[in-house]
Amino acid sequence: MAVASRTAEAPDLDEIRKCVHCGICLPQCPTYRVLGEEMDSPRGRIYLMRAAAEGRVGLSRTFQHHLDLCLGCRACETACPSGVRFGSLLEATRAELRRAGPPAKHRLLQTFIFSVFPEPARLGAALALFKLYKRSGLRALVRATGVLRRLPQLAAMEALLEDVPAAAPLPEFVSARGRVVGRVGLLTGCVQRHLYPGVNRDTARLLALAGFEVVIPKSQGCCGALELHAGRVDAHASRARALAAAFPDDLDFVVTNAAGCGAAMKEYGHRIPELARFAARVRDVTEVLAGADLPLGPLDLTVTYHDACHLVHGQRVRQEPRQLLRRIPGLRLVELADSDLCCGSAGIYNLLEPGVARELLERKLARIVESGARVVAAANPGCLLQIAWGCRQRGLDVTLVHPVELLARAVDAHQG
Ligand code: SF4
Ligand code: SF4
């Protein structure tokens, strides 16, 4: 079959050909489980990519639709016995669609998201306006008019945000406690620094307690993950280069506590070879703390753990968060059924595809209720926002936390 003329960002045909159509990935794919359509499964999407590469189909609206519905959760990668790197294929296909396909859906919303979310200062200003919107009574008024029912994407964004905490800036350097075992950088992230500043504070504190000097450069920006997943590869590359340049060269690790950021940063070298050395030093905070001797006091809690897709599938970090939580005296960790099935957050997927996202959230909430836990730990801000919103909607008495918050509470309990 003749290969059609491709753009520079076309997915790698050799990678596409690694798929042997076995279908083992299908039961692990959230969109296949919800929609039951072959074209909304990994195998179907790879079939479409191959058909486009061989010139049998164009980059049509239908093609775009099936790719848009993909969460980019990478559960299919974990399942695949042939080692198909679906995430890379998806990123390249989305980049190709952006350059040579039909106009993107929800263009206005996407323009807003991509001009605000990856810019920490703009995101901070937007969140300050949201605070005002909520406190002034405007939110209640807007909800009462019912206007949001006609704008499901806007409604999803509005509903996700319940509160915007006050965020005191972190110092640029935190000294190690006791014997120095190493020196690490801390990524503060975009959403994380504004919506979960306590997670960054606890991360720095725990790393220091574990004996690490912690460098937190003020000049650091966004990691570019959102842009990469949307096929905005040029913007991603410039953010990746700027972020790597913001961290000093003498670090043992660059630590993240947001699964999506960590997965993207660990793979910087795939697209930008000169960042391979930086990428090799990136670690999730749970990987670094798993080997640390932390002074942990008792917490009388029943906790379940939700695997963030880009931690468990993107970074293959599954055991470390569980091991850390099990080390807290008194804490009962109960397994969550389908713990590694996407909650529907997936970056900005819940804003762009609220229908499928909502269905996945409902499934996650049902499993949480079955677990009997009142506390759900998850290591990604998107999952925390999404599941907390679902719990509020359903009136569930469930608290969402990052694992480092529980560890920090256990340290407090130890210190009495
Ligand atoms: S990335 Fe997730 S949603 Fe997309 S095909 Fe793979 S398993 Fe399905
Ligand atoms: S498991 Fe791998 S080889 Fe099998 S259909 Fe899925 S992507 Fe293709």
Image (cartoon, rainbow, N blue to C red):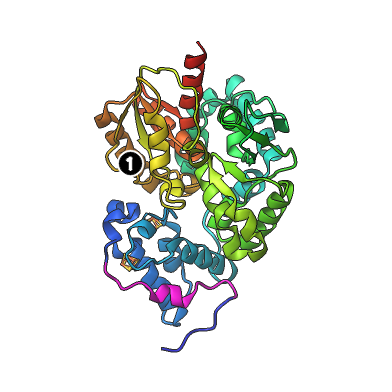
Residue at the bottom extreme, as displayed:
2
Horizontally, is 366 left or right of 235 in the view?
left
Label 1, residues with CA under 10 Å away: few <14, some 14-19, many ≥20: some
| Residue type highlighted by circle 1 | Ser
Which stretch appears magenta? 8-22
Residue 128 is inside the magenta segment:
no
Ligand 1 within 8 Å of the CB at mark 1? no
- Total number of numbered discs in the rendering: 1
- Residue 38, given in percent of the width and then of the height, sits at 29, 64
Q: Which quadrant would residue 179 be assigned to in this image?
A: top right
Horizontally, is 324 left or right of 115 in the view?
left
Residue at the left extreme, as displayed:
370
Q: Residue at x 27, y 26 (%)?
A: 372
Secondary structure predominantly adopted by residues drawn in magenta: loop
Does 339 sit above or below residue 2? above
Disc 1: which residue: 339
